[in-house]
Amino acid sequence: MKRLFALAVLALVACGPTQVAAQSGRAVLGFGEDRGAGRQVPLAQVVRSIAARHPGRHLNTTMGEYGGRAAYFVQWQMENGRVVVFVVDAESGRELGRQGG
């Protein structure tokens, strides 16, 4: 499973510029209401949104950038056991893509 996750993250990195949130100076979790000013959707809200559409369980989350925007990379195990990495825009909570599964 760890190899699959590592391969999925590497594939996502190859698809677009990725930079660790700490290196970019952005907060990992922003809890403010003003999402238009660089604030981020709470991770708990992102996980609830994924769970509502895709039954399974949350395994891990990392932060980075995808297409120049802050993003959550959410590792999710589907009901059938397959692992998917969802790429979610950290400011809007919108799913940008997925890898695996």
Image (cartoon, grey):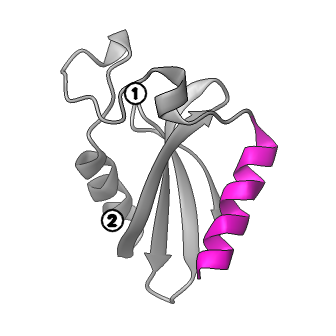
Q: Amino acid at mark 1?
A: Glu
Q: As drawn, which residue projects farthest toward the bottom? A: 80
* Towards the viewer: 63 or 82: 63
Question: Residue 98 occupies which quadrant of the picture?
Answer: bottom right
Location of residue 54 with respect to 65 vertically, above or below: below
Our reading of the magenta stretch's main secondary structure is helix
Mark 2 crowd level (few <14, some 14–19, many ≥20, 10 Å Cα): some
Q: Secondary structure at mark 1?
A: loop
In this figure, what is the number of numbered marks? 2
- Tell me: 64 left or right of 26: right
| Residue 26 in sight here | yes
Taking the magenta stretch, the answer to whether it contains residue 11 is: yes
Q: Residue 82, image x and y in percent?
A: 57, 83
- Give the residue pinned by disc 2: 51
Mark before the other along the chain sequence, 2 or 1 = 2
In contact (CB < 8 Å): disc 2 and disc 1: no
- Give the residue pinned by disc 1: 91
Location of residue 81 with respect to 66 vertically, above or below: below
